[in-house]
């Protein structure tokens, strides 16, 4: 072997130790493939999600019912005050016995009562978040269901709000009670300082709600979609050699390419590769070791010829 060829071989060995992403393609005639029962399967894309732990707590509906009653009463008083102020203003303008001072007092009282309604609505928004967005009629209907055990409010929390973004619903299993489906209404607006969680408020509707006593807690699993996607690799396609994990990709009816991959999460269908493969590529799931032998034999013959 000449000095130049020896240097080139050393360079190739160095690249091999660094972990090449693919090897030189290898050819195998169709007749040989049939004799070896070489089989392929398509790589299938998958979107992964990570699971994080949180907890759910059944909320006491009494403070909400009490605040709603205060608001309803304040609205009624404000409506009456506004009507009285309008009547007093009209009488005063028509020159009746109603004095200007009495008219001004009626209008001032109307403003005070209206301010009380505003205060209760703001309190509702700050304490009960998404429930404040409901109309008065819908909120009253929800409270009716809550007081009769046909609905329940559940707060969802997780450390650092992980998994809360975009959450629409979650299933919660309460020991001895079963699993309930919680539909998320929106942000709670009051934080859980222990977890640093802004929290979410959800509702449970149906017969199970009657069994959800205020204060009950349960662990809950939240899913976080991972960025990007990967492909599922059947375990039979994996080949371990030279300190790396490989798969053979069928490029044409008789040409195969060996690629190094990094294995990620395991699934029931196989293992997930985050890069190096695309959905739809044909992977050798039977006969990969024979391809490796053919590839190695070809490399050895080339070195011997040199």
Image (tube, grey):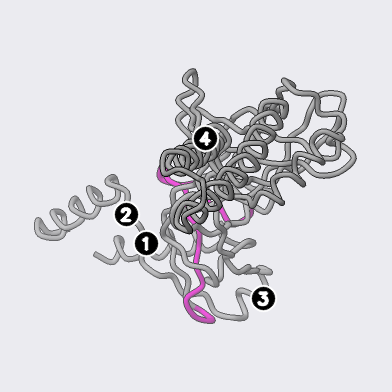
Q: Which residue is mark 3?
A: 34
Mark pair 4, 2: CA separation: 72 Å
- First in residue order: circle 3 vs circle 2: 2
Q: Residue furthest top?
A: 194
- Marks 3 and 1 sit apart, C-alpha to C-alpha, by 23 Å
Q: Are dots 3 and 4 in contact, CB under 8 Å? A: no
User: Are circles 3 and 1 on residues that touch, CB within 8 Å?
Assistant: no
Which residues fall within the magenta stretch? 236-254
Considering only order in the chain, which callout, 1 or 3, is on the residue closer to the N terminus?
Answer: 1
Bin the neighbour count of mark 3 within 10 Å (Cα to Cα): few under 14, some 14-19, many 20 and up: few
The residue to which callout 4 is attached is 116
Q: Which mark is residue 20?
A: 2
Whether tag 1 and tag 2 are in contact, CB under 8 A, the answer is yes
Give the labeled residue for mark 1.
23
Query: Residue, x 54% and y 39% (percent of image)?
Result: 117
Q: Residue at x 53, y 37 (%)?
A: 113
Along the viewing direction, whichever of 200 and 84 lies nearer the viewer: 84
């Amino acid at each position: 072997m000449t000095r130049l060829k020896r240097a080139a071989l050393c360079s190739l060995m160095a690249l091999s130790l660094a972990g090449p992403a693919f090897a030189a393609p290898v050819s195998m005639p169709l007749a040989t493939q049939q004799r070896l029962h070489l089989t392929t399967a398509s790589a299938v894309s998958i979107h992964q999600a990570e699971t994080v732990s949180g907890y759910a707590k059944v909320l006491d509906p009494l403070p909400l019912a009490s605040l709603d009653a205060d608001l309803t009463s304040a609205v009624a008083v404000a409506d009456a005050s506004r009507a009285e102020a309008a009547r007093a203003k009209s009488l005063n303008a028509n020159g009746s016995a109603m004095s200007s001072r009495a008219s001004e007092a009626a209008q001032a009282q109307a403003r005070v009562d209206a301010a009380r309604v505003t205060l209760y609505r703001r309190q509702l928004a700050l304490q009960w978040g998404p429930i404040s967005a409901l109309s008065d009629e819908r909120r009253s209907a929800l409270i009716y269901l809550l007081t009769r055990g046909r609905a329940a409010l559940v707060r969802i929390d997780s450390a650092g709000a992980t998994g809360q973004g975009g959450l629409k619903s979650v299933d919660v299993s309460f020991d001895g009670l079963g699993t309930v489906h919680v539909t998320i209404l929106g942000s709670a607006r009051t934080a859980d300082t222990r977890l640093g969680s802004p929290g979410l408020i959800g509702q449970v509707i149906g017969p199970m709600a009657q069994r959800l006593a205020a204060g009950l807690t349960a662990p809950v699993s939240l899913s976080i979609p991972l960025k990007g996607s990967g492909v599922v690799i059947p375990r039979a396609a994996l080949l371990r050699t030279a300190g790396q994990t490989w798969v053979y990709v069928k490029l044409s009816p008789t040409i195969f390419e060996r690629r190094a991959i990094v294995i990620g999460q395991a699934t029931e269908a196989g293992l997930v590769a985050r890069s190096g493969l695309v959905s739809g590529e044909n992977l050798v799931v039977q006969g990969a070791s024979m391809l490796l032998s053919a590839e190695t034999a070809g490399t050895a013959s080339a070195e011997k010829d040199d």
